[in-house]
Image (tube, grey):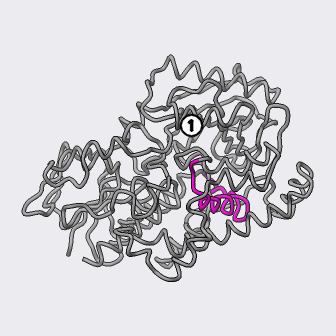
Amino acid sequence: MKEVIVIGSGFSGLAAASCLAEKGYKVKVLEKNDSPGGRARKFKAEGFTFDMGPSWYWMPEVFEEFFNRFGKKVSDYYDLVRLDPSYRIYYKDDKLEVPAEIEDLYVLFDQIEPGSSEKLKQFLEEAKYKYEVGMNEFVWKPSHSILEFMDLRIAKSALKLDMFSSISKQVRKLFKNPKLIQLLEFPVLFLGATPQKTPALYSLMNYADLNLGTWYPMGGMHKIIDGMISLAEELGVEILCNQNVTQIDIEKGAAKRVLTETDVYECDFVVGSADYRHIEQELIPKAYRKYSAEYWDKRELAPSSLLYYIGVNKKLKSLKHHNLFFDKDFDQHAKDIYEEPKWPSDPLFYVCVPSVTDDSVAPDGMENVFLLMPLAPDLEDNEEIREKYFNIMIERLEEQTGESIRGHIIYKRSYGIENFKSDYNAFKGNAYGLANTLRQTAFLKPKMKSNIKNVFYTGQLTTPGPGVPPSLISGQVVAQEILKQ
């Protein structure tokens, strides 16, 4: 029986592990931290249950299809609910709620900018086409070379995919109201470039957002991880925590064993699901590395984040499950992340209150609050800086909602760039992976296949890119590549 070592237990690692175990491979997953899940871990404190990372559940069919391949359903592992409204946006002098029903969204657009609903229909029709082509033709390819994309069907599609125009240009050609422009540009903020530099191809994210909807797994996002762990263990996967990998031994061009601080594991294949750059540059001898240190330094990364997990001892009537605070200059914050990296002068931020939907994540009469401020990676990070921005966010939150919050906080924990580095060995403390720019799309990303014949990579620094659904897909694609060997 072939033995596979998977380094890291996030979405991509668990997906790869289950796919390989189902085909008869003996799979061990080595997790550095004391609990599995990678960025989607949870922790409990003072009666609250906090998701540590991802909080948006988009593209529900990707999750359903993953479990379906094993004869399972999402509902076997967690209860999924669609949020309505999908989210609320706070502007400087106004707020709007994005409805789950598309017809209600058309009405909302016409109220804000008369006649814009017809333009929105056109925009979303084009976004649907990009989504379907992207999901059917692009994301399931290992992206070893451009030849994978030289299919006549894909070539015919290329012109309609708007690869060489920006999403900003496309949105602003159709809409004039700044509120609608921000609503349509916001999903790309986490892809790793300003809307002005993000290919219009990624309007497919708007289709995922506005048409397919925003969902929530009851109990929290970690319920997805719990379900994937249950499935993996049912298939015979062994998940070992507190196993910090220190070295991959190479003999005659192949990985022979994986060393941790405490153990040695023999292997026939290695799947690197942890930070790609860390594994390649720190765990593998220089002679076998595919990329140089200079190569990695030139990569454009998606943002890092400053996070706060907060327990509030009262109900907050003015907040929805997802809340975006766009009451400051959107373009300036994007510039502070991507063009002139620094701590933002006037940050935008995001507030998730899952206890609005789910009573189980907070004690009775209280709220579970998650604050997120996107940041450029690799900035100086310390408690003094974090506290400064915590105060900015809380002051704005109280000002915009009219609610007293600061005096009701009974639990608070921060998480930032230095934590991403120490917990996940994340390159420059990035939170989301590699930016989805034109020069880092598809076959231009770091390759899944390494220079070592039995070592492969998966996750947010390789194909297809950042985000939970892409990571889930990435793990399945890398398993298929190993099965071809």
Q: For the image shown, how many numbered marks are present on the structure?
A: 1
58 and 154: which is toward the camera: 154
Residue 359 in percent (x, y) is at 69, 46
Residue visible at 83% across and 44% down in the picture: 96
- Residue numbers of the magenta segment: 197-219
Q: Residue furthest left?
A: 252
Residue 152 in the image: above or below residue 220 = below
Quick check: is 9 in the magenta stretch? no
Residue farthest along the top direction in this orientation: 384
Amino acid, disc 1: Pro
Percent from the top left, x then y, of residue 88?
77, 44
In the image, 365 versus 97, the foreground residue is 97
Is any atom of residue 155 visible in this view?
yes
Which picture quadrant has residue 84? Answer: bottom right
SS at badge 1? strand
Q: Is residue 199 magenta?
A: yes
Where's the N terminus, which quadrant? bottom left
**Residue at (68, 24) in percent of width and height:** 394
Residue 234's place in the image compared with 364, above or below, is: below
The structure residue drawn at horizontal position 34% and vertical position 41%, both measured from the top left corner, is 297
**Quarter of the image that includes the C terminus:** bottom left
Give the image location of residue 387, x and y in percent. Answer: 56, 20
Give the residue at mark 1.
374
